[in-house]
Image (cartoon, helix red, strand yellow):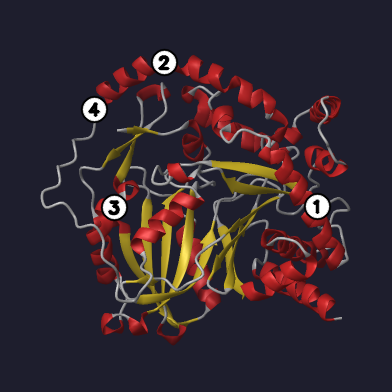
Amino acid sequence: MRQLSSLDAQFLNVESARIYGHVAFLGIYDPSGAPGGKLGGPEVKALLESRLHLLPPLRWRLVQVPLGLDLPYWVEDPDFDLEFHVRETALPAPGDDRQLAETVQRVFGRPLDRGRPLWEIYVIHGLEDGRVALLTKIHHSVVDGLSGNEIMGVVLDPEPTGRVVDPKPASPPAPAPLPRDRAMLLRGLRGLPRQPLRAIRSLPTTVAGFTDLPGANALPGLPTLSHVYSRVRRTLGSDESTDILEVTKARPPKTPFNGPVSAHRRFAFGSLSLDSVRQIRRDFGVTVNDVVVTLCAGAVREWLQERDALPEDPLVAMIPMSVRRRDERGTWGNRISMMVVPIPTNEPDPAERLRRTHELLRSAKERHSALPASLLTDATAFIPPAVASLAARNTVDILSRTRPPLNLVISNVPGPRSSLYCAGAELTANYPLSVIVDGVGLNITVVSYKNRVDFGIVGDREQIDDAWSFLEGASHALQELENLKRA
């Protein structure tokens, strides 16, 4: 048995009839080089069957502690059924990108069955040019971005012919039966004395980093606390810039996508040239992440302008960051932190928008680097497991109806520069889908792959009337920066 961390459990606690805690990847494959030119359910199941022993999280099933006395546990599912997790569907051929997105957003908008391991793969046929899509859903309580990449590294191969993997044990031990409620109740009672100790141990970390916790800037008195914090830092000799103060005190303006979300999603996907992004990075002396966030800021600015809804103040974005060390690879679960930072959506000049993005992200990183890696985990440890679920949902609901702590999520995940293959079929693009919650109805996640940056836009269906416009805006923003350098 393996107990979830308090942060892992939060991705379960936030779920409701309208909010889901799973993430997904939409992989587009060219099966022409695969054996028989096919990639379907049988091929995917055969591949997974041969590698499941290398993928423990795919066999984990959630077991709750009665009465919520302690954090839940993962156990190996004694009734694991691979057939349940791999499914096939099809578009009316030849299906275009918008038809594919319609299918994906419907499938993505369904919760995962908590009575099974929390993942599913949908093999989608009927795409143009004989392509096949694989939509992989997995719960965020199981993996973060880097551990999700570890799973991908086991499933996918660097060569179309595959690779040698560690063989499956000849006689693997049978999984133990699921623990009974009484046994879990006793385990929960034994764990009760540890909960106050867990909170006490996390107290120094949480107090020191309180002003940097996602959502803290929406609380009354935070500007005063930030001001005092900054004065103390300067008194102690810290070189605190005005940009860091701006990051600390940023308050999000209201936008059309900052209300309570519905149960339905909109999804759009597309790609831009990674070579172009890298050239802009070199030309302007910034980072790839600076360019990507600037493209997102330009896209959101254009979308809001078209709807006469662009605020005068900059929007505030949450940017997830991995804090997983090299020696923590293979430990699964979540090792993440968050930067909450303003993005210059109010800046009309594209070059100045890139410069401001670079300064704001640099300041946020400087501030973030001084924080303990365990901040989010330690902060969630203060919430007793018995009330964590109710507290998480009520907090998100209240903030969404008053003044949300941020406007959107932007995530940029570096990926491989060389081709990957699934059962001999080449992965040509890899579009991410991520989480939205009440008050934050827009998520832009970007994954680099080969010479592309693949965008996945997820929004609330009731608040986002057209998700494809964000992709057009990102393309326009890239073109603006390219034109500036040519001029």
Image x and y of residue 199, in percent: 54, 19
Image x and y of residue 59, in percent: 29, 47
- Give the residue number, with chain letter if any, for mark 4: 180
Sequence order check: which comes first, mark 1 or mark 3?
Answer: 3
Q: Residue furthest left?
A: 171
- Give the residue number, with chain letter if any, for mark 1: 359
Q: Locate the C terminus and report the quarter of the image it occupies.
A: bottom right
- Vertical comparison of 401 with 293: above or below: above
Secondary structure beneath dot 2 equals: loop
Sequence order check: which comes first, mark 2 or mark 3?
Answer: 3
Q: CA distance from mark 1 to mark 4?
A: 55 Å
Secondary structure beneath dot 3 equals: helix
- Give the residue number, with chain letter if any, for mark 2: 192
Q: Residue at x 37, y 57 (%)?
A: 120
Q: Which label is found at residue 25?
A: none
Sequence order check: which comes first, mark 4 or mark 2?
Answer: 4
Q: Residue at x 38, y 18 (%)?
A: 191
Q: CA distance from mark 4 to mark 2?
A: 19 Å
- Vertical comparison of 252 with 223: above or below: below
Q: CA distance from mark 3 to mark 4?
A: 27 Å
> Do the residues under discs 1 and 3 have CB atoms within 8 angstroms?
no
Image x and y of residue 343, in percent: 78, 53
Sequence order check: which comes first, mark 1 or mark 4?
Answer: 4
- Give the residue number, with chain letter if any, for mark 3: 54
Sequence order check: which comes first, mark 3 or mark 4?
Answer: 3
> Do the residues under discs 3 and 4 have CB atoms within 8 angstroms?
no
